[in-house]
Amino acid sequence: MVSQAKVLIATAFTFLVLCAPVQGMLINLTPGQIEEAIEYGKAGKDTKMADFSKEWTVSLGEKVGWATLYSEFHNLAYKARKAVVEKRELFPHEVKKALERRDVLTFSVTVMTDSLYYNYHRPSTLRIGDRVLPAAYEFQPEMCEDSDYFPESPYYVAACVYQFPIQGIETNSKITLTVLKPEGDEINFDFDLSKLR
């Protein structure tokens, strides 16, 4: 039989968890958060990149594609990891550079495709509730690269970058990044910013 004290503790814990404010994605990192990001990066030096970036990545499957959001925290953690892997110090100018793009959301997107070239061009979009924002910056390769599956389908892979202004986006929002595959099909990546650092 479960004691009354255990039930009371479990109830109190559940109440605290459910009533805790949603923090949301971290922006304008405090000195403590900067140190936390650097330590996360250093600790992840032996971790596969996919596992290291899992918190910030939405995957639609290895044969479809994935998108990674480079928040301030993730960007700084990545640079700290890179420095440790390269067996060198993380320089102050690298920290500054990692934190200077506070005004944009940057997505690195990998799209698997059977088309060597982008046949369709339309700006990618970011949906936040009822609002739809076009990308402020896009990079799509002129020509895709052979995938690890080549000569099987999907034959090619496209590594793309998209940036959107962060102004007016709540850091605990649910957002959808919509991009086009080279053959013109839309793919959607759903992110919950409240679960990201």
Image: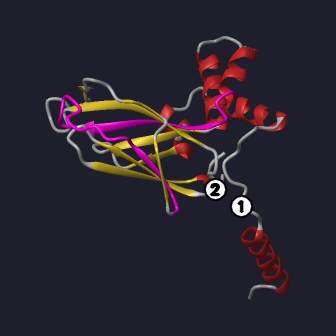
**Residue with the most extreme left position:** 151
* Residue shown at 20% from the left, 29% from the top: 117
Left or right: 191 as drawn, with respect to 149: right
The secondary structure type at the circle numbered 2 is: helix
Rendered position, 105 above or below 129: above
Q: Is residue 42 visible?
A: no
The amino acid sitting under disc 1 is Val
Which part of the image, by quadrant, shows the C terminus? top right
Q: Is residue 123 shown in magenta?
A: yes
Q: Nearer the viewer, residue 82 or 186?
A: 186
Q: How crowded is the residue under tag 1: few (<14 C-alpha within 10 Å), some, or many (20+)?
A: few
Give the residue number, with chain letter if any, for mark 2: 194
Q: Is residue 34 visible?
A: yes
* Residue shown at 60% from the left, 57% from the top: 173
Residue 149: image location, x then y, percent: 22, 33
Residue 63 image-quadrant placement: top left
Residue 112: image location, x then y, percent: 28, 38
Tell me, yes or no, whether the two marked residues, 2 and 1, touch with CB atoms within 8 Å.
yes
The secondary structure type at the circle numbered 1 is: loop
* Residue shown at 49% from the left, 40% from the top: 68
Residue 156, numbered label: none
Left or right: 49 as drawn, with respect to 109: right
Give the residue number, with chain letter if any, for mark 1: 22
Which part of the image, by quadrant, shows the N terminus? bottom right
- The span picked out in magenta is 100-129
Residue 183: image location, x then y, percent: 20, 41
Q: How many marks?
A: 2
The amino acid sitting under disc 2 is Ser
